[in-house]
Amino acid sequence: GNSVTQMEGPVTLSEEAFLTINCTYTATGYPSLFWYVQYPGEGLQLLLKATKADDKGSNKGFEATYRKETTSFHLEKGSVQVSDSAVYFCASPSYNQGGKLIFGQGTELSVKP
Amino acid sequence: EAGVTQFPSHSVIEKGQTVTLRCDPISGHDNLYWYRRVMGKEIKFLLHFVKESKQDESGMPNNRFLAERTGGTYSTLKVQPAELEDSGVYFCASSQTGDNEQFFGPGTRLTVL
């Protein structure tokens, strides 16, 4: 079945630093790809998504490009803020087995002022 | 529009006791999913309902877990008897038919002592 591999954390950055969280996938075909975020004390929220190869998802200053050549969907932000401190999850649907999502391990990001 | 809600937000029980978690999906969403995140690891799929029917329950860890969705609206997930390893955060998500995007609830944090 499909799988998602995500860089492990925790990641600690200073405010205004550049952020990259790596995510790679293995899949049959080209499934949609998602980044979800969980802020402290809250539930999972969809941060951005891409539904086909070469698509770029963006939201709140975050971007991720669906690259089929490298089977990657890395999350980037040019200048992080303290409020970006959260756990980030890369995910993809498991086409062969219905609509369930396959998640990466989660990366905890801590941004210091 | 109300989002996915879950109850309770936290539950602390002793080993051997029973706990029932509830999820209310977004109105009109036929798909309902349960996921679990144990000890900071990846979020894992438990099962998927389409309306009141179990579409995929391949992620249910064992027969101590029982999920229901009578009437195709809200769902319950019962753990009986609870074991220490059942501790974690249980997420519920819902989606419309044909849509890959799943909307998540805030989760229920279960602690088994």
Image (cartoon, rainbow, N blue to C red):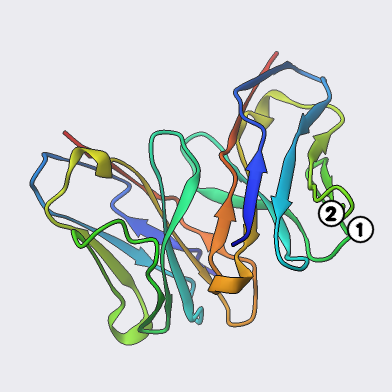
**What is the C-alpha distance between the residues marked 2 and 1?**
5 Å
Q: How many marks?
A: 2
In the depicted view, which residue is nearer to us: A42 or B82?
B82
B64 in relation to A86, above or below = below
Whether the residues at callouts 2 and 1 have beta carbons within 8 Å, the answer is yes
Point out the image quarter for the N terminus of chain B: bottom right
Q: Chain of mark 1?
A: A
In the depicted view, which residue is nearer to us: B29 or A72?
A72
Image location (x, y in percent) of residue B78: 21, 61
Q: Secondary structure at mark 1?
A: loop
Q: Is residue B62 left or right of residue A47?
A: left
Residue positioned 48% across, 48% down in the render: B43
Labelled disc at residue A54: 1
Residue A90 visible? The answer is no
Q: Amino acid at mark 1?
A: Asp
- Mark 2 or mark 1, earlier in chain: 1
How packed mark 2 is, by other alpha carbons closer than 10 Å (few <14, some 14-19, many 20 or more), is: many
Q: Which residue is mark 2?
A: A66
Residue positioned 62% across, 53% down in the render: A3
A25 in relation to A30, above or below = above
Image location (x, y in percent) of residue B40: 45, 34
Q: Please, which residue is most extreme toward the left here? A: B16
Residue positioned 57% across, 56% down in the render: A102
Q: Is residue A6 left or right of residue A78?
A: left
Residue A17 visible? The answer is yes
